[in-house]
Image: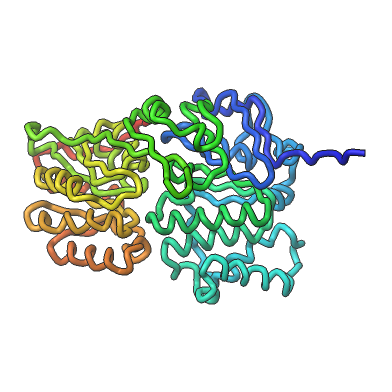
Amino acid sequence: MTAARSPPPLVVRRTTVRYGDRVGVQDLDLAVGAGEFVALTGPNGSGKTTVLRAVLGFLSPTQGSVEVFGRPVEALSIRERARTIAWVPQEESLRDDVPLEEYVLYGRYPFHSFLDRETPAERAGVRALLRELALEDRARDGVLSLSGGERQRAVLARALAQETPLLLLDEPTSHLDIGHQLDLLSRVRARTRATGVAVVAALHDLNLAARFADRIVVLSHGRRVADGTPSAVLSVELLARVWGVGADLERDRRTGLPYLVPHQISVAPASSEPPASLGPVHVVGGGGAAAPILRRLVDAGYLVTAGALHLLDSDTEIAQALGVPTALESPFAPLGEEVRSRHRALLSRAKVITVAPFAVGPSNLANLEDVGPFVARTPTYLLRSPPIRERDFAEGRAEVAYGELLRAGAHEVDDLAGLMRELARALPNSVPPAPAATRETP
């Protein structure tokens, strides 16, 4: 007699999710099997996070259903969901400076009643996780003392401590440098193979998705436009149709996996010198850190440039959607001399320079270094939060470069509102920008 087959970890059937009159996801079908790593990818606003929030039960579909191991997610209690689904959000604000080991033990709470205490076996399991994620030496340190990369691994460790059969990750690499991106996804991939946990990860980088995922599901305007293995999905045509980017398709000789080498480059025309009163204001960023600045400046009527950025970076998507000229480099590549030269040309034409609080690694350290020569003659503002030490993935070199900018005359500002006030003073002929609703971007 054949044993009954267990239901798959996740089935999304003909699901539509709305935000008022706006459709977040439309008529989506998706199934994820045990031990499968599925990457959700697509441009900003394509519906990746909406799908994950529907799986968690945070959003209710207006049509269709979401089932976890054969049960509608809304039928599961909060405790049952926490025992079944672990969640690594895009960002998590750590407020209490608890020891790292205690923070990771929070993942065991769904398995205890109110008065229960963790068992010795659970503590041993958490210590093993910290060893696996190279955090063992920080076990007794407060979580607020961790670097950005360590915090991301801590959040992953807490999720893994739940020992759930389904793991969801929302842009887990968005604020990490390349080395930490590869490290985190390698660990998730190894965990999938070792334990059979099903993983669904929202990733904006197609090349990362191709390297680590068994399947890639591409979303555009809330609809599924591709679903298959990396070799079946990645194509020059797909990148042009969904992202509007030209590329060459290559294959890794070691693994046989496909990867895309985008070559669309957008730079400011040399002849376009805008009025001094309106800019240009040049924004240095990456990894999504510059997005709110770009939106606010464009909405306020300033002429804006940006760079240097990597193609497929979320800041690049926003810059392109807003029509902001920038200097672009291929994904994963260190900023090359040609791109740095274009970036310095944009910096030389800027009337104000602002540096977003982006994560700095070896591949984009040049962005800070290239700002230096322009600080003495161009008002330069650095957004200070989070502190540079938490964003320094370049072995202290980013903190050194940041300090050199301050010594050269750059000024720190606390937030975007403070930046806008300084900008109105630095460009006195412009109309001080009033707060405005942020525009929608694709």
Q: Residue at x 35, y 43 (%)?
A: 313
Residue with the most extreme right position: 1
Quadrant location, the N terminus:
top right
Please count the marks in the image: 0
Q: Position of residue 181 (x, y in %)?
A: 44, 54
Q: Residue at x 20, y 38 (%)?
A: 304
- Seen in the picture, residue 118 relative to 409 is either above or below; the reply is below
Of residues 284 and 18, the one drawn nearer to the viewer in this rendering: 284
Q: Is residue 334 left or right of residue 409?
A: right
Q: Residue at x 59, y 61 (%)?
A: 158
Quadrant location, the C terminus:
top left
Residue 411: which quarter of the image?
bottom left
Q: Is residue 78 left or right of residue 25?
A: right
Of residues 379 and 289, the one drawn nearer to the viewer in this rendering: 289
Res 391 visible? yes
Res 205 visible? no
Q: Position of residue 203 (x, y in %)?
A: 47, 43
Q: Position of residue 155 (x, y in %)?
A: 54, 59
- Seen in the picture, residue 59 relative to 366 is either above or below; the reply is above
Q: Position of residue 232 (x, y in %)?
A: 51, 32
Q: Residue at x 53, y 63 (%)?
A: 154
Q: Is residue 179 left or right of residue 168?
A: left
- Seen in the picture, residue 371 relative to 234 is either above or below; the reply is below
How is the protein colored in the picture?
rainbow
